[in-house]
Amino acid sequence: MSDAMFPPIPRPEVQTLRMSKIREVANAGLGRDDILAFWFGESDQSTPDFIREPAARALLDGRTYYTHNLGRADVRESLSTYLTGLHGTAIGVDRLAIVSSGVNAVMLASQLVISPGDRAVVLGPSWPNVPEIPKILSARVEMVTLEPAQGRWRLDLDRLMDALTPDTRMLILNSPNNPTGWMLPEADRAAILARCRQYGIWLVCDDVYERLTFDRPSAPSFLPLATLEDRIIGTNSFSKAWRMTGWRLGWMVVPPALIDGLGVLIEYNTSCAPDFIQEGAKAALDHGEPYVASVRAELIAAREQVLAGLRAIPGIEAPQPDGGFYALFRVAGCTDSVALCKELIRDVGLGLAPGAAFGPEGEGWLRWCFAARPEKNAAGLARLAGFLAR
Ligand SMILES: Cc1ncc(COP(=O)(O)O)c(C=O)c1O
């Protein structure tokens, strides 16, 4: 018998973290090669050659050493040029850091501003990492729910305003939102910013889908409204717009006063992003605009295809996403989305993400990542229609 006095268990905050329900569903399909999977948030196409080739060359040239905590100076210059052009306002390198993925950026932003017991507000349903990361740091997290209305997802601005109380430390605003595809209306920005300024609330903008928009080149952003003194942090990623999910590279935009603290935090998290990976990111930033435009064109067609296909199936309600690459839809009578997803795998080999993975607000809904070739989306829609017709 062991004579250890204390059980080897993690902190209470870690024990109460949600397990991924997408993984739970995906595990049910393990070992089967007939699954058509739309459950994860990534394209079915790999990163383009104009990004892969310089990274591969850098690796072969032996560029395998540590880099600056905040990222390579030339990559930050490229990022500054890219963001300045995108937002029509100067965003200098003194506000920029290259970090190890979009999820790492959300963690670093939270580590910068959250102390134990702080109150954080997030929108739901939500990609689980957004509410769970502040909880790791012992924050209290409050959810403001997005609702479907007239075929779109809507934010009740008054409800968000009510949630932004004087004791709120941080609002994480993910727009376009995963999983709903809701996009913050341009006109809502001023009121949110004014409230954050009034109470000193940190506004963390998770903008990883900002280039995946259907009727404009990028989503409404707070960056053009931000002064250098504003408590605004942008978190972003190379994953989605340039199809670089497996590269694990992202960036942050912070007030200049935060950049030294951020560099220290990066040192203690990952120390730096790999040199040869950053070589690929530089190519994406310097030469990627035509490619991003082509990704957007493909997604516009895919959204039409999947939305029309879902809406043609009796019993399905599918609000229109305004950005991102997900359709979150409801099947009449579904109250257990995990069970339904497992049935879909078992019976017709269709892999979808259960809405419950995105919090209780998502229960009854299913998420389809439509960043797939048209023939794959079509085959998936046929399987879903066949299953529901039985
Ligand atoms: C809302 C949101 N933020 C951030 C990320 C993180 O992206 P990555 O860590 O791949 O850069 C994701 C990925 O799915 C996401 O959906």
Image (cartoon, rainbow, N blue to C red):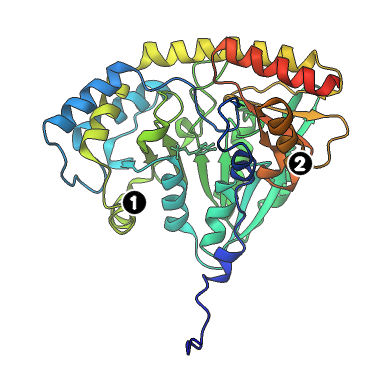
* Residue at x 67%, y 54% (from the top left corner): 142
Q: Which residue is mark 2?
A: 339
Question: Most extreme residue toward the left, as rendered?
Answer: 61
**Amino acid at dot 2:** Ala
Residue 197 in percent (x, y) is at 55, 48
Q: Position of residue 111 (x, y in %)?
A: 44, 57
Nearer-the-camera pick, 30 or 375:
30
Q: CA distance from mark 1 to mark 2?
A: 48 Å
Q: Is residue 130 left or right of residue 269?
A: right
Instruction: Report crowding for label 2: few under 14, some 14 to 19, many 20 or more residues within 10 A (C-alpha).
Output: few
- Look at the numbered discs 1 and 2 and tell me whether their residues touch, using CB distance below 8 Å: no
Q: Position of residue 192 (x, y in %)?
A: 61, 41
- Per the image, label 2 sits on a secondary structure element best described as helix
Residue 144 x, y percent position in the rendering: 71, 46
User: Three-letter amino acid code at disc 1?
Assistant: Ala
Would you place residue 11 above or below residue 110 in this image? below
* Mark sitting earlier along the chain (1/2): 1
Visible residue check, residue 287: no
Q: Is mark 1 within 8 Å of ligand 1?
A: no
Q: Residues within 10 Å of mark 1 (few under 14, many from 20)?
A: few
Q: Quadrant of residue 315?
A: top right
Q: Secondary structure at mark 1?
A: helix
Q: Quadrant of the C terminus?
A: top right
Q: Can residue 369 be seen in the rendering of this structure? A: yes
Q: Is residue 340 left or right of residue 136?
A: right
Q: Name which quarter of the figure residue 216 lies in.
A: top right
304 vs 143, nearest the viewer: 304
Q: Nearer the viewer, residue 301 or 10?
A: 10
**To which residue does mark 1 refer?**
257
User: Which tag is nearer the camera, tag 1 or tag 2?
Assistant: 2
Q: Is residue 211 above or below residue 378?
A: below
Give the residue displayed 17% in from the left and 30% down from the top.
58
